[in-house]
Image: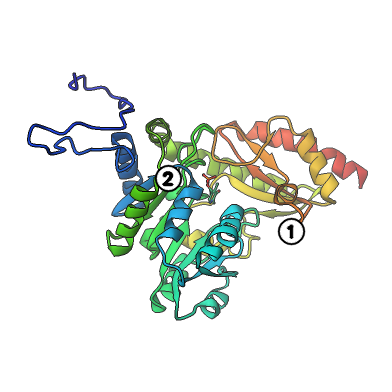
Amino acid sequence: MGDERPIAPPIHLSTTFERDEAGEYSGGFNYSRDDNPNRRMLEQALAALEGGAEAAAFASGSAAAMTLFQALRPGDHVVVADDSYYSIRVMLDEVFVPWGLTVTFADCSDLAVLSGAMRPATRLVFIETPSNPLMRVTDIAGAAEIAHAAGALLACDNTLPTPVLQQPLALGADIVVQSTTKYISGHHDAMGGALITGRDDAFWQRIRAQQRLCGAIPSPFASWLTLRGLSSLVQRVRWQNESALEIARFLAQHPAVREVLHPGLPTHPAHALAAKQSTGSGGLFSFRIDGEAKDALGVAARLRLFRRATSFGGPDSLVEHRASVEGPNSTTPGDLLRLAIGLEDPSGLIADLERALTPVRATR
Ligand SMILES: *Cc1c(COP(=O)(O)O)cnc(C)c1O
């Protein structure tokens, strides 16, 4: 057994691997928390896609972010984009501030604000671009310059654009964060996350040690599903990116829509910067109804092709009223809906939106 030469890789469920007669692990694996063939295949593919030296895969995007912060030391200071992924901000407040990190949340899309937030103890700047649901754009090369001048690393959450549309390492970032739960696995059926590094250095070895010691790793099956999804990543993301832009243009001229937040539209304040550092923002964007929260909720309720659910990156288009999800402390406008464009034909999605928006126009 072992020479069957399958095209789709087998799933290696074994938690433990055998030593040879000399007592060595000549097969290259010893225990699946340390490393597993399915996880290693996924890590190598992710490193290649992001143009990195190495990647480490985790059980979720949140576990990847957790491991990044754990590789710092108590007393270190981090600057975190104030509109980065909501639950990463909560993780910092509830877990890592008590643990000993000092955190400054800042609007990193304004480089002067980022500069002003840097301190002598700053070890890491954490950005996400474009952010969501507000789709703010941060200058990756500019942020890298500021971080490096202060002796800090730049980490960039690249979940939205994926490496297909944006390559932060090539723009100067040191570490890329991915929630592979979204576009990379791409089918709403596998949780996962990854860190991808530009260099295999001492900090990366601390991340590897955290991965091994703390064990927030993906299962062999999740690794396999994610790698399977990855094989169609380029085609899916290109389709979803183009559909989203077409739908955004439709919404931008609709009388019941106040504003469309999409970096691909010339009306977006950072349209030129977005075009310079990426070839698209992916299938996720937001728009604001010309009305109130109840009107936005009414539109979401009338949509049929769009399902009312959180997340993005899968084949099914989703709609979400972010202010309700984020709760009473949310700063997201109540009239805002976030759309995650799936793999359906955009003409059907446009017809669905047109029908759901019509009563908003009629009641005004
Ligand atoms: C979903 C998401 C995360 C968290 O990933 P999980 O896999 O849900 O833990 C982090 N960053 C961004 C931008 C995300 O969309």
The image shows residue 63 at horizontal and vertical percentages of 47, 49
Is tag 2's residue or tag 1's residue first in the polypeptide sequence?
2
> In the image, which is nearer the foreground, mark 2 or mark 1?
2
Q: Amino acid at mark 1?
A: Asn
**How much space separates mark 2 and mark 1, taking CA atoms?**
30 Å
Element type at mark 2? loop
Depth order, front residue of 189/166: 189
Counting labels gives 2
Say the numbered circle drawn on residue 329: 1
Determine if residue 357 is in view: no
Depth order, front residue of 167/158: 158
Q: Amino acid at mark 2?
A: Ala
The answer to whether residue 313 is above or below residue 323 is above
- Residue at 57% across / 44% down in the picture? 283
Depth order, front residue of 358/169: 169
The image shows residue 257 at horizontal and vertical percentages of 77, 50
The image shows residue 156 at horizontal and vertical percentages of 46, 59
